[in-house]
Amino acid sequence: MTISQAAARTAKASAAKSETPDQNGGARQILNAAAWLLRHRGYEATTTRAIAERVGIKAGSIYHHFPSKDAIVERVINEGVLVVNKAVMSALDALPKKATPRDRLQAAIKAHLLSSLEHSDYTSASIRAFAFLPPELRKTCRVERRRYEDIWQQLMRDASQSGYIPKDVSLDAARLMLLGAVNWAGEWYRPGRVPIDKIATDFAQIAFGARRA
Amino acid sequence: MTISQAAARTAKASAAKSETPDQNGGARQILNAAAWLLRHRGYEATTTRAIAERVGIKAGSIYHHFPSKDAIVERVINEGVLVVNKAVMSALDALPKKATPRDRLQAAIKAHLLSSLEHSDYTSASIRAFAFLPPELRKTCRVERRRYEDIWQQLMRDASQSGYIPKDVSLDAARLMLLGAVNWAGEWYRPGRVPIDKIATDFAQIAFGARRA
DNA sequence: CGATATACCTACCAACCGTTAGGGAGACTC
DNA sequence: GAGTCTCCCTAACGGTTGGTAGGTATATCG
């Protein structure tokens, strides 16, 4: 017992040091495991025991780092929104000043797709698992989501003013259509087939016409 | 016991006769309950006991009608796809012969939205709950889904040939973008606000330009 | 009237759920 | 070297899950 425990501990310590460049305290490993499970299996299937197994600990040990399962889920979902929020914002900031509203829209689409499809289980979890969260938890997480949607609302306003969106269509419809398209991408996208860049430009072209329209 | 049981039975029989114009054997009531739960609560929360409670029976009685929970789920999901398939097909058939590919696209969007948002818990369940189904079940249900997507593939081809889709965008991207937009509508649509008709025309206009472009 | 079939019930099973209590081993501090 | 802190363990709690066995009331039919 003592020997194998010590061995496991050593192995884990070294693995933790080499594997992830992130901060990887026990808490971070738990969040990573929960994010993966939320993305791929959903809320109910994200059990404390399943999380623990992915981390390599026992279920009870989780409660040394978090007070409850829902506290873990809440952090994952909120971090997921924050990650994509930051990704989109910095993609927009990186654009040259003369970028058109359409350029900005396309950059936002690409950043959102990259974040939710390639970079972050957290973002994907926040998109896919949100619908079936327990009502109370869903309410809590809605705050951060709204803040993210505000970015898109502004993008749509700018695009509309520059004539990229027909005047008789609702800006809400346009925003929700676009967010629907990018959020749903997680349901069909498979890595290594169509590059995300191409998807982003196609989406932008369908919705807003050719560049410099 | 005997009295209350008899009373419950009578009440159920009359309710069954008046409530739903459908066939409503016990099996159908179970499917209806499961469809509602799958749509609003997801797969794992759709427990045999929750289904039974909505029907007004006990959990064990379900197994007189179905061999397992997953058999119920499979039927609901598949019927959901079939319902929207039929809805879209008959909407297309009802169009005048001179309808343009764009008219057909818009009619398909409207029919899909109506089916998934207003008419059918089954359709909505098949869209929302699919992602987190157990892998085996998901594989089984994929067959019917593919058949439905074929409709859209054909619609996109026609639209492309008539010039409604830029030549340098992938038809798959266009199809998946549109399906994403309509499938995601279930996440934000609330009855009694924006009419579905308006959503459909807005979506079509954003994606394919003004009518008779 | 007796036989059969239908549709439900009760009561239970093993497995699993989130969570808790209490303990032990190693590392840091004084 | 004793005390404390961190991190993990075992073992269990009450409750819920999908599913089963066996019984009972009703309706139909010969």
Image: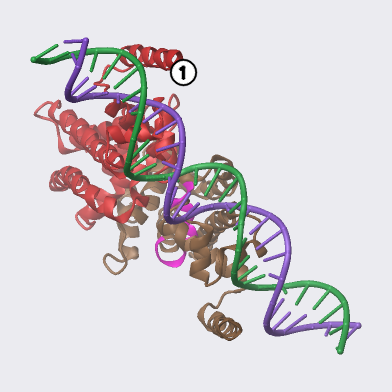
Chain colours: A red, B brown, C green, D purple
Asked where in the image residue C22 lies, by quadrant, the reply is top left
Residue A121 in which image quadrant: top left
Relative horizontal placement of residue B71, taking residue B51 as reference (left or right): right
Position of B205 with respect to B171 (left or right) is left
Pick the front one: B207 or B113:
B113
> Residue placed at 66% from the left, 56% from the top?
B67
Q: Is residue A15 above or below residue A168?
A: above
Q: The numbered mark 1 sits on a residue in which chain?
A: A
Q: Is residue B212 above or below residue B119?
A: above
Task: Categorize mark 1 by other alpha carbons within 10 Å: few (<14), some (14-19), many (20+).
Answer: few
In the rendered view, tell whether residue A114 sits above or below residue C28.
below
Q: Quadrant of residue B59?
A: bottom right
Residue C4 pos. (x, y %):
84, 73
Q: Assign a secondary structure to mark 1.
A: loop
Q: Position of residue A164 (x, y in %)?
A: 20, 44
Name the residue located 50 percent from the left edge and 56 percent from the top edge: B47
The reply to whether residue B124 is in sight is: no
- Amino acid type indicated by mark 1: Met
Q: Nearer the viewer, residue B57 or A203?
A: B57
Stretch in magenta: B117-130
Residue named by callout 1: A1
On whether residue B126 falls in the magenta region, the answer is: yes
Residue B174 makes an appearance in the image: yes
Residue B62 image offset from top left, x and y in percent: 61, 63
Relative image position of residue A110 (x, y in whole percent): 28, 32
- Magenta stretch, main secondary structure, is helix
Q: Is residue B78 magenta?
A: no
